[in-house]
Amino acid sequence: MKDFPIKEYQFVQVSNSKIVLRLKRSDNVSKGVKEKIIDTYKKYLPEQTGLDFSEVDSFEKTITGKFKFVYKQFME
């Protein structure tokens, strides 16, 4: 993600076939940048896995105050 103009982000696995990349709304990420992110990461994801985007105002931190860049949000 260092190659993209994004300050804060979070990858969230919401199902076996879907990843959501949460981006800070204030970063104003263009459609073109989002397309480049998809092109970059699709080669690392299983073939049937989609990558969607969600813009948020802020990110939750853990109880200890840490920020999780990647996490799983569903139960199998």
Image (cartoon, rainbow, N blue to C red):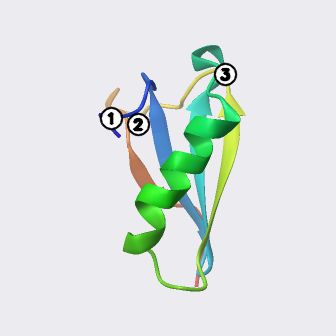
Tell me where residue 46 appears, x and y as whole percent: 47, 83
Q: Nearer the viewer, residue 9 or 40?
A: 40
Q: Which residue is mark 2?
A: 62
Identify the residue under disc 1: 3
Residue on which the image places disc 3: 25
Closer to the chain start, of discs 3 and 2, is 3
Tell me which residue sits at (60%, 85%) in the image.
Answer: 48
**Distance CA(mark 3)–CA(mark 2):** 21 Å
Q: Where is residue 56, by image quadrant?
A: top right
N-term mark: 1 or 2: 1
Measured as percent of width and height from the top left, residue 71 is found at 44, 57
Which element type, helix, strand or loop, lies under badge 3? Answer: helix
What residue lies at 66% left-to-right and 22% top-to-bottom? 25
Height in image: 13 above or below 54?
Answer: below
Could you tell me which residue is drawn at 63 percent across and 14 percent down? 26
Q: Is 15 rendered above or below residue 23? A: below
